[in-house]
Image (cartoon, rainbow, N blue to C red):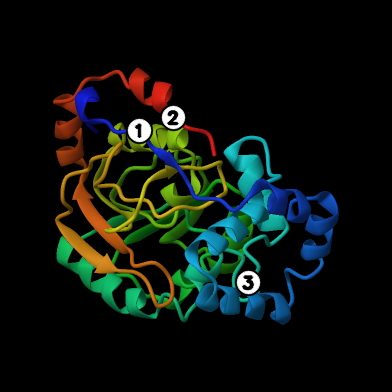
Amino acid sequence: MTTVETLTPPVPCRRLPATFSQIAGTRVFDKAVDGLRRTAFFEACIDIARRTLPAPALTWLRSQMVRNLTGTPREVFTEIYSRNIWGYQETVSGGASTMHFTEGLRQSLPGLIADLKIGTMLDLPCGDFHWMSELELPVSHYIGCDIVPLLVQNARIRYGRPNREFRTVDVCHDPLPEADLLLCRDCFVHLSEDMIFQAIDNILRSNIKYLLTTTHPEGKNCVIHNGDWFTLNLCAAPYNFPSPIRVLDDWVPPWDRRQLALWEIESLRRVRRNTTPSRQPIAAVRVSP
């Protein structure tokens, strides 16, 4: 989305000293925590940590949850789902998919969809469809997609109906279903830089009119492994999206301030046509965490 000359090197997310990682990143630690993940006690601990710990410590804790996950994005996110690594009882899709977190979004999203006169909405990733199940969206057709097959299967059994379908789709590699709007919430924030660019390229090849996706206006872009998390700012380097045409607030304190931002995909294609097609220099300056 940018010329080579305007690129700035991504920086690694801030971590605590490696000695802490060596202690808490062991298999013994992982096994012990896995036994607690589905308990109310673990969920309460997560909420307390989010409210009280400084940002570097929180970043480190998040990284410990996924530090030993390897494989393809499908394998990584399947393990996150099967082990409930986000640690919430209410929803396996994590804290940002709880009813508390999405209260404001559940009020504002239907109005935006109605304003845009959306017929078919593609929701990718749809996760377990937990908070979305409370909405009656003003659309004629809803397509929920996720990279984790078992999530899709469960959503199809529980929530499927004639105008609401669920499919297994990889946003980075699979052809995307035709739609008027792609809601891509809490996706890029968990992907490596390579995967984000692959997903963007795939979206630009699709027959979709609008993209509504997560961005952090004051976020700092950095390099992560798939399954980790960072405060993605799509309007900053190396992504350099233009200003969005609409935004919806999508956060609650003490989480980082973020938005769902709307772009016409054709406008993103025009930006791409005016930039150098090769991104080889980006890979050359990429820094591993």
- Give the secondary structure at mark 3: loop
Could you tell me which residue is drawn at 41 percent across and 40 percent down? 11
Query: Taking 244 as reference, is 112 above or below it?
Result: below
Task: Kindly check if marks 2 and 3 are in contact, taking CB atoms under 8 A apart as contact.
Answer: no
| Residue with the mark numbered 1 | 9
Could you tell me which residue is drawn at 54 percent across and 72 percent down? 53
Mark 3 or mark 1, which is nearer to you?
Answer: 1
Crowding at mark 3 (Cα within 10 Å: few <14, some 14-19, many 20+): many
Task: Kindly check if marks 3 and 1 are in contact, taking CB atoms under 8 A apart as contact.
Answer: no
Q: Nearer the viewer, residue 118 or 7?
A: 7
Q: Is residue 237 visible?
A: yes
Crowding at mark 2 (Cα within 10 Å: few <14, some 14-19, many 20+): some
User: Quick one: quadrant of the N terminus?
Assistant: top left
| Residue with the mark numbered 3 | 88
Task: Kindly check if marks 1 and 2 are in contact, taking CB atoms under 8 A apart as contact.
Answer: yes
Give coordinates of residue 155: x percent, y percent. Answer: 57, 62
Looking at the rendered structure, the kind of residue marked 3 is Tyr
Mark 2 or mark 3, which is nearer to you?
Answer: 2
Whichever of labels 2 and 3 marks the residue nearer the N terminus, that label is 3
Could you tell me which residue is drawn at 26 percent across and 31 percent down? 7
Give coordinates of residue 26: x percent, y percent. Answer: 80, 50
